[in-house]
Amino acid sequence: MAGVKLEIEVPEDLLSILRASRRDLETEAGRWLALALFKSRRISAGKAAQLAHMSLADFMEFTREQGVVWTDYTDEELERELREARELGRRRREQRE
């Protein structure tokens, strides 16, 4: 996936406090950003999963663990999610071939 690299500044001691590597923190920050954008309905679940570098199923599980409710989606929003999920699945299959 081609993308734009974002950079954030964190306190110097944060990695040692969290007992995490820079890569671990980058991964976690990406997942939380994806979750926040999805939760505010700014991006679809498919896009959020892509941003979080997770499968759609794993992202759905992550949202469940965080208490994000999916049931208040409109029919149009659910249709969009399904279309994007199908497209994401198609792209992944093509990448494997």
Image (tube, rainbow, N blue to C red):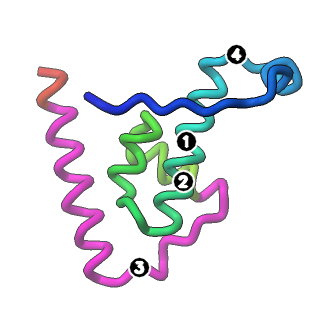
Say if mark 2 contacts mark 4, CB within 8 Å. no
> How far apart are the two marked residues, 1 and 2, measured between alpha carbons?
6 Å
The magenta stretch spans which residues?
A: 64-93
Say if mark 1 contacts mark 3, CB within 8 Å. no
* x and y percentages locating residue 10 in the rendered image: 73, 30
Q: Which mark is residue 21?
A: 4
95 in relation to 66, above or below: above
Residue in view at x 26 percent, y 80 percent: 76
Which structural element holds mark 4? Answer: loop
* Residue highlighted by disc 1: 31
Q: Is residue 42 left or right of residue 85?
A: right
Residue in view at x 34 percent, y 50 percent: 47
* Residue highlighted by disc 2: 35
> Which of the 4 image quarters holds residue 21?
top right
Which structural element holds mark 3? Answer: loop
Q: Is residue 32 left or right of residue 14?
A: left
